[in-house]
Amino acid sequence: MIAPLDTLYRLIKPIMFRIDAERAHDLVGVGLAACPPAWLRRLMGTGSAVDPLLSIDVAGIRFAHPFGIAAGFDKQARLLHACAALGVSHVEIGTVTPRAQPGNPRPRMFRIPRDGAVINRLGFNSVGAAAVAGVLHRARRRGVGALLRIGVNIGKNRDTPLERAHDDYLIAFDALASDADYVAVNISSPNTPGLRQLHERAALRALLDGLVARRQAMARRVPLFLKVSPDERDAQLQQVVEVALDSGIDGLIATNTTLARDGLSAPVSHTGGLSGRPLLARARRTIAMLAVMTEGRLPIIGVGGVDDAESAYGHIRAGAHLVQCYTGLIYQGPGLPARLAHGVAVRLRADGFTALREAIGVDRHRWC
Ligand SMILES: Cc1cc2nc3c(=O)[nH]c(=O)nc-3n(C[C@H](O)[C@H](O)[C@H](O)COP(=O)(O)O)c2cc1C
């Protein structure tokens, strides 16, 4: 199951890994955006029927299979046709901030190949909500949504005081929600000072109530997901779950990058959020804790450290309804989503499940 694009990626990867990680990411983006989707599909070998065992409805949305691309990969919605051609069921664009902002000074993204990890401190570099809304709207009109579910991840500008963070989320929501299949409320990036304080009960309550009220004014009920940090104490997670359930949002995303440095084979001095393989266990535990705390009342998108079918299947068995990856794509190449779909379907059958839904959360108590 090696697609031609995977072979190509394996050939260029050693060269890409010699240049700055963000620059390499930008170059891949330019290449993907320039390549006609039909060519990409041929190069990827995608377009063949997806195993019906993998299809799932989450928050009222039908996903052909659970595997998608996490926030940060396509911050500006410029790679939607490419993402569809890669065969993912969904992509979460963003994080998008209301106003354009440059993010932190470069270099701000670092690979740690021996651990299959990345540290980033991009700090929400964004072209702003109005610009992304225009791109997204045009892509929708060209029909990209037929193949791909699109989540829009929103955040606050760095210079907006935390007390006024709610206004930023509302501005971004108003600009983007009408073209989103779901909206992800990002309170968990470690690179925007103070952002994670929005996990606190009162602040979170006000934030989610405001967004829920706003979507009630819309013609369509856009599902709202809350993206949480892997670094919260259990008591804090419990509060998040209570507020999430009370507010009437539709699901949780676990997790963002971690400030912890466990799982690395040697110390690394870069500051920022750690993703990839060293995050796997921490993300897995958070998914399982949330699955137990919500008692299945809120779907969970599991993200963190997935780089093969075994790790994806583990997240599903811990409680994830959908699974996203980003760092795994950097190390394993564009064929990863197709390999996840194949490998998880094989594992589901081997374990005697007749639908993906039956496997979700069966191991949740094992990880808590
Ligand atoms: C370079 C980079 C940029 C990211 N940017 C964002 C972002 O803008 N918003 C967000 O919610 N998560 C962002 N993330 C976090 C990912 O969406 C994901 O939660 C995290 O990387 C764990 O998944 P992974 O181990 O598969 O990479 C970013 C991750 C990386 C590596």
Image (cartoon, rainbow, N blue to C red):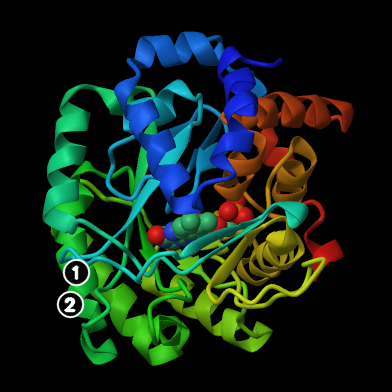
Label 2 CA crowd tier, 10 Å (few <14, some 14–19, many 20+): some
Foreground of the two, 323 or 224: 323
Dot 2 amino acid type: Asp
Q: Which mark is residue 170?
A: 1
Q: Are marks 2 and 1 in contact (CB under 8 Å)?
A: yes
Q: Residue at x 38, y 23 (%)?
A: 147
Q: Quadrant of the N terminus?
A: top right
Dot 1 amino acid type: Leu
- Badge 1 residue CB within 8 Å of ligand 1: no
Residue 17, percent across and down? 59, 44
Foreground of the two, 64 or 125: 125
Q: Secondary structure at mark 2?
A: helix
Q: CA distance from mark 2 to mark 1?
A: 5 Å
Label 1 CA crowd tier, 10 Å (few <14, some 14–19, many 20+): many
Residue 117, percent across and down? 66, 57
Q: Residue at x 62, y 15 (%)?
A: 3
**In which image quadrant can residue 256 be found?**
bottom right
Residue 60 can be seen, yes or no:
no
Q: Residue at x 30, y 62 (%)?
A: 125
Residue 263, percent across and down? 79, 67
Residue 105 lies left or right of residue 172; in this view the side is: right
Foreground of the two, 201 or 31: 31
Q: Give the vertical position of 102 relative to 360 (above or below).
A: below
Q: How many marks?
A: 2
Q: Which mark is residue 167?
A: 2
- Badge 2 residue CB within 8 Å of ligand 1: no
Q: Give the vertical position of 196 relative to 175 (above or below).
A: below
Q: Residue at x 31, y 68 (%)?
A: 103
Residue 187 lies left or right of residue 206; in this view the side is: right
